[in-house]
Amino acid sequence: MDFLRRLAKAMFTKGGGDELHAFPGEPLFSKRAFHALVFVFGASLFLAANWFGLLLINSEGVVAGIGVLGTLRVNAALMAGIAIPSALLMLHYKCLYTYTSEEDSFFAITFSIAFLLGSPCALVGIFG
């Protein structure tokens, strides 16, 4: 329950009266959970880069092997593996509404790119 309260506080409070700067507070995740999120983010980024490289080199073979829907489902899963840790790491840095630090800008950009690439694939993969 304490984790949910800290998560809600991180999402709905801006911290201080200054709109342009985010003031540091206590971390949202423990050090162990933070390292796990960074690991999942990095592993998903690595796997997605390998997947897109495989699709660039041999897209006909991949589609023939697992089908179009399977290809879209793998793409959606890899993009979700990037988007979900990115959103959680943005919350961890306590800067959901301001993008003044490098970490927040990086995770906001990776979240938006992964979400925009993965959501159409997920919709087609689920309803296709």
Image (spheres, grey):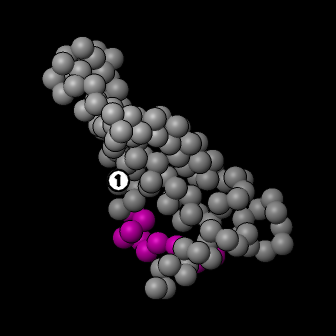
The amino acid beneath tag 1 is Val
Give the residue at x 50% y 78%. 4
Q: How many marks?
A: 1
Q: Find residue 34 and report its image quarter.
A: bottom left
Q: Quadrant of residue 124?
A: top left
Question: Is residue 106 visible in this depiction of the protein?
Answer: no
Q: Is residue 41 above or below residue 36?
A: above
Identity of the residue furthest to the bottom in this view: 1
The residue positioned 65% from the left and 61% from the top of the image is 95
Horizontal and vertical percent position of residue 115? 50, 42
Nearer-the-camera pick, 46 or 74: 74
Looking at this view, is 85 or 23 the one in front?
A: 85
Residue 99, x across and y down, in percent: 70, 52
Asked whether residue 127 is drawn in magenta, I would say no
Q: Which residues are magenta?
A: 24-35
- State the image coordinates of residue 24 (x, y, percent, origin top left): 66, 71
In the image, farthest residue toward the left = 65
**Where residue 27 sits: x, y (%)?**
54, 73
Q: Which residue is mark 1?
A: 40
Q: Quadrant of the C terminus?
A: top left
Q: In the rendered view, does 94 fall on the left or right side of 87? A: right
User: Is disc 1 placed on a helix, strand or loop?
Assistant: helix
- Of 82 and 67, the residue lying toward us: 67
Residue beneath the point at 35% across and 54% down: 39
Residue 53 is at least partly visible in this image? yes
Q: Is residue 32 magenta?
A: yes
**In the picture provided, is 20 more to the left or to the right than 113?**
right
